[in-house]
Image (cartoon, rainbow, N blue to C red):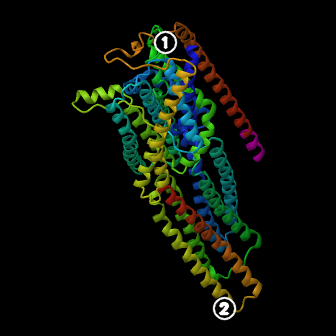
């Protein structure tokens, strides 16, 4: 039953993987620098790693905005966000899962009578503006650096493109890691206060309750990447292909850096230790950071034809997404509570841990931890099998190409 | 990754070897025409054979470069232009081969008074081709310098046109002793030699556009 409640989060994760993987590998695959199969495998692995290893920071901030303290509430909130993302995508409005989930959490706060922490809300909303701006600044600086290196090194174009290809794979992996670390909060953040799973000790490391949820969410994102992102990449990638390969590398790197900065608790503590303000650990929209980076490069190159329509659509998205998602969450919670009689959460008592706000009724299911215990080795075995299979097919393909080449040259001679 | 590095290295070597073939082809053409005008047929035939070998090698390299770029998805964004450039450069060595073959088969009777003019046309046309090769190499290593290198190609192409027009005027207006068929044959040979610089100019136009695209 508890797993059933997670399905809305997993659906949101799937749609995030299907949509946002194109931000990480879209330009590389669209420009034929990296094959989709290779990109999807790398992105899937690194999204899961980022989610499990570094997903806590941004998730905590979402928890501060509204600690959804019943699994019925978490399910409804995630479902409202997922439906919003789906509908916005259908009407071709650039959508951010971050904005959808923030709107849905505020909807839950309004429904249950919980106050919305205005400081946290301001922190999150300010990153919607600063994220793309920082992305643009990073993109311009990195682009200038790359151009200077290219100009002064006299590197052969073929070798340079080969390095760019390697760079796109590495940066794509970093981007996928940052996407997992930052955006897992959108997918599983609302479930964290409502779930209290048993810790899993794997000898080398232990997986906490939230990390287990993040692993599931990461796998849902990976499933979205593997099953559906190629269709989105075909559309988005061909738009981004207008950029040169080095600009594509810069755009993905600046996006990965921005996402990493807004999810790295280590970096934030480091800044505090040198008496600088901490970085707010909040989920930011990868799509909007990408748009910011592309505009940054466009401005640097002196482009005068910046599409203000796209900027306008993003602005509409900033307002429409959270408002629509919030309203949808509010009315859905009403139906779920009154028609299906499912507990969707109640007003929190200040000073009590989120998991116990419901009179200690946070969902405890040893079954899920048991599933996770078997799922992890299963995942490792499936992953190793997948890599072996990929290697086998790649080798077969190469041999076929080699044979046909030899035949061709024999005939020519 | 090691496999990919090896492919990259091989492709760079093949592109360089292709340019070397065109460069040497131009040198051999120069010596071949001089040998023909000096009536040194043994040396001329040797040069014809040499050019044929170079043209065959350039064709093989051209196919191999295009093949490798497609099969290993190298330079996906510049592949079409690089392929076009290599095609046009191959036209230069094709033109060299066909011109030397015209000399070999048709044995044009060039009056000794025109030897100097023919050498000038040939020199200027070959120089246009020779100046193109460093520009083509620079496209891959220092695209910022391509356009300044191309200025000489345009200069030599225009020089070739001038000398060619001047020589044709002499042939058709001053050399009354030659019959029309002879005059037409000489014009035909001049056009053949001129074709090298025309093709070099075509490649220069292409390179110029390619350089802007890559620098932007």
Per the image, is A68 magenta? no
User: Badge 1 is on which residue?
Assistant: A363
Q: Nearer the viewer, residue B30 or A232?
A: A232
Q: Quadrant of the N terminus of chain A?
A: top right
Which residue occupies the extreme front position in the image?
A: A338
Task: Indicate the position of residue A86 as horizontal and vertical percent values.
Answer: 58, 36
The stretch in magenta equals A405-413
Per the image, is A407 magenta? yes
* Image quadrant assignment for residue A230: top right
* Image quadrant assignment for residue B205: bottom right
> What subunit carries mark 1?
A
SS label for mark 2: helix
Task: Indicate the position of residue A248 as horizontal and vertical percent values.
Answer: 49, 45
Q: Identify the main secondary structure in magenta.
A: helix
Question: Does residue A62 appear left or right of residue B103 in this picture?
Answer: left
> What subunit carries mark 2?
B
Task: Indicate the position of residue B118 as horizontal and vertical percent values.
Answer: 62, 77
Q: Nearer the viewer, residue A364 or B137?
A: A364
Q: Nearer the viewer, residue A377 or A113?
A: A113
User: Badge 2 is on which residue?
Assistant: B173
């Amino acid at each position: 039953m508890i797993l059933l409640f997670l399905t809305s989060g997993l659906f949101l994760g799937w749609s995030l993987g299907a949509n946002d993987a194109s931000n990480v590998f879209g330009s590389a695959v669209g420009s034929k620098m990296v094959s989709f199969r290779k990109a999807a495998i790398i992105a899937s692995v690194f999204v899961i790693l980022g989610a499990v290893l570094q997903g806590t920071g941004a998730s905590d901030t979402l928890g501060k905005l509204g600690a959804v303290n019943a699994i019925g509430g978490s399910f409804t909130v995630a479902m409202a966000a997922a439906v919003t993302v789906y509908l916005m995508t259908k009407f071709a409005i650039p959508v951010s899962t971050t904005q959808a989930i923030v709107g849905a959490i505020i909807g839950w706060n309004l429904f249950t009578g919980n106050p919305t922490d205005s400081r946290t809300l301001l922190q999150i909303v300010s990153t919607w503006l600063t994220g793309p701006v920082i992305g643009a600044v990073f993109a311009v600086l990195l682009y200038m650096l790359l151009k200077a290196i290219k100009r002064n090194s006299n590197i052969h174009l073929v070798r340079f493109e080969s390095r760019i290809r390697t760079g796109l794979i590495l940066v794509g992996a970093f981007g996928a890691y940052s996407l997992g670390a930052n955006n897992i909060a959108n997918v599983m953040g609302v479930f964290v206060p409502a779930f209290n799973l048993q810790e899993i000790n794997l000898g080398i490391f232990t997986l906490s309750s939230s990390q287990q949820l993040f692993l599931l969410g990461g796998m849902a994102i990976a499933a979205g990447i593997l099953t559906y992102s190629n269709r989105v990449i075909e559309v988005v990638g061909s738009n981004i292909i207008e950029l040169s390969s080095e600009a594509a590398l810069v755009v993905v790197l600046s996006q990965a850096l921005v996402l990493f900065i807004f999810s790295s608790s280590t970096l934030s503590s480091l800044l505090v230790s040198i008496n600088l303000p901490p970085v707010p650990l909040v989920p930011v929209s990868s799509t909007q950071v990408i748009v910011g980076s592309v505009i940054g490069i466009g401005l640097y190159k002196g482009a005068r034809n910046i599409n203000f329509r796209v900027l306008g659509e993003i602005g509409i998205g900033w307002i429409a997404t959270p408002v629509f998602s919030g309203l949808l969450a509010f009315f859905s919670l009403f139906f779920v509570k009154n028609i299906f009689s499912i507990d969707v959460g109640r007003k929190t008592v200040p000073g009590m841990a989120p998991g116990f706000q419901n009179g200690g009724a946070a969902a405890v299911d040893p079954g899920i931890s048991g599933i996770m215990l078997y799922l992890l080795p299963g995942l490792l075995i499936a992953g190793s099998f997948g890599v072996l299979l990929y290697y086998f097919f790649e080798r077969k393909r190469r041999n076929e190409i080699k044979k046909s080449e030899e035949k061709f040259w024999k005939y020519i001679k | 990754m090691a496999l990919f590095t090896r492919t990259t290295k091989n492709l760079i070597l093949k592109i360089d070897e292709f340019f070397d073939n065109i460069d040497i082809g131009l040198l051999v053409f120069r010596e071949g025409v001089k040998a023909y005008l000096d009536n040194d047929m043994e040396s001329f035939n040797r040069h014809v054979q040499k050019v044929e070998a170079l043209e065959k090698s350039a064709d093989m390299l051209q196919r191999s470069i295009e093949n490798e770029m497609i099969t290993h998805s190298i330079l996906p964004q510049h592949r079409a232009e690089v392929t076009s450039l290599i095609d046009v450069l191959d036209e230069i060595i094709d033109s060299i081969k066909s011109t030397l073959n015209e000399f070999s088969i048709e044995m044009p009777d060039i009056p000794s008074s025109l030897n100097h003019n023919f050498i000038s046309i040939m020199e200027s046309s070959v120089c246009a081709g020779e100046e193109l090769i460093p520009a083509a190499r620079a496209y891959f290593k220092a695209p910022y310098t391509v356009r300044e290198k191309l200025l000489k190609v345009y200069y030599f192409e225009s020089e070739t046109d001038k000398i060619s027009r001047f020589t044709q005027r002499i042939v058709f207006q001053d050399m009354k002793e030659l019959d029309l068929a002879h005059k037409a044959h000489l014009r035909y040979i001049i056009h053949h030699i001129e074709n090298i610089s025309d093709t070099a100019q075509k490649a220069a136009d292409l390179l110029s556009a390619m350089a802007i695209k890559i620098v932007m």
